[in-house]
Image (spheres, rainbow, N blue to C red):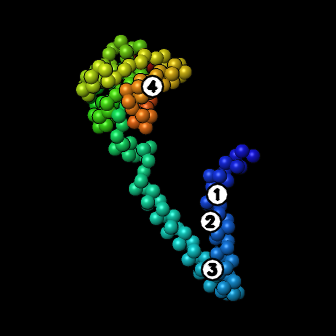
């Protein structure tokens, strides 16, 4: 029952337009045109073309107002970014370095393993992009402990909020830091 209710709540406009509105329009046109099948078919084709034109225009309008996850992520200003980092995240061509240079956040949080922490990867990233020591934090986690990673991410978000950022100013990117050295495999 919950699924059906959620479906109707999320699709009420489509249901109203397609199931009710179009039926009312086609019935009204049929009555108006009388029993002339050719005119009814031509009117139906015209309605279909009109609907296709309206939905295409709607898609074009929505395409100009893309959300963050649809390709404009590097144009949205972020004052705080949290990354997972790996042993190569400090390389000049790494995604972490490129994103920080593009977005120039005030604060960064780095989540990595003990090995990345011991190798000073986060510190090197911060130095390469010009972040002062009080504007970044590193957390060493066990990469197989999702609960620990989540808790440390929450701590980093809270640290940024305590510095005056709002939740809308902060983005968390947990996609990096998962590469294995060539001599290892995930199997």
* Residue at 70% from the left image edge and 87% from the top image edge: 35
The tag earlier along the polypeptide, 4 or 1, is 1
According to the picture, the residue beneath numbered tag 1 turns out to be 12
Q: Earlier in the sequence, mark 3 or mark 4?
A: 3
Residue under label 3, please give it.
41
Label 4 – label 2 distance at C-alpha: 45 Å
Mark 1–mark 2 Cα distance, whole angstroms, equals 9 Å
* 10 Å crowding of disc 2: few (<14), some (14-19), many (20+): few
Q: Are discs 1 and 3 less than 8 Å apart at CB?
A: no
Q: Nearer the viewer, mark 1 or mark 3?
A: 1
Mark 3–mark 4 CB contact (< 8 Å): no
Identify the residue at horizontal 51%, vertical 64% (top origin). 55
Q: Secondary structure at mark 3?
A: helix
In the picture, the disc for residue 17 is: 2
Precedes in sequence: disc 1 or disc 2: 1
Quarter of the rendering containing residue 60: bottom left
Labels 1 and 3: the sequence-earlier one: 1
**Whole-percent x and y of residue 162?**
41, 25
- The disc label shown at residue 158, or none: 4
Kind of element beneath mark 2: helix
Foreground residue among 80 and 139:
80
Q: Which callout, 3 or 2, points at the residue further toward the start of the chain?
A: 2
The residue positioned 43% from the left and 55% from the top of the image is 63
Give the x, y percent position of residue 167.
44, 34
Q: Nearer the viewer, mark 4 or mark 2?
A: 4
Spatial CA distance of label 3 from label 4 is 62 Å
Q: In the depicted view, which residue is nearer to us: 107 or 172?
A: 107
Distance in Å between CA atoms under marks 3 and 2: 20 Å
Q: Is residue 97 left or right of residue 160?
A: left
Crowd rating for badge 1 (residues with CA inside 10 Å; few <14, some 14–19, many 20+): few
């Amino acid at each position: 029952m919950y699924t059906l209710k959620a479906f109707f709540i999320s699709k009420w406009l489509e249901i109203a337009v397609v199931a009710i509105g179009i039926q009312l329009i086609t019935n009204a046109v049929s009555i108006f045109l009388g029993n002339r099948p050719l005119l009814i078919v031509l009117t139906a084709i015209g309605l279909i073309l009109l609907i296709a034109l309206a939905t295409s225009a709607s898609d074009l309008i929505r395409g100009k107002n893309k959300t963050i996850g649809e390709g404009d992520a590097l144009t949205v200003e972020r004052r705080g970014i949290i990354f997972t980092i790996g042993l190569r995240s400090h390389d000049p061509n790494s995604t972490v370095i490129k994103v920080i240079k593009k977005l120039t956040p005030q604060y960064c949080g780095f989540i990595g393993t003990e090995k990345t922490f011991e190798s000073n990867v986060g510190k090197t990233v911060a130095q390469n992009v010009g972040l002062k020591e009080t504007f970044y934090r590193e957390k060493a986690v066990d990469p197989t402990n999702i609960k620990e990673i989540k808790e440390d991410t929450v701590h980093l978000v809270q640290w940024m909020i305590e510095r005056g950022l709002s939740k809308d100013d902060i983005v968390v990117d947990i996609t990096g830091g998962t590469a294995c050295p060539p001599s290892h495999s995930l199997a």
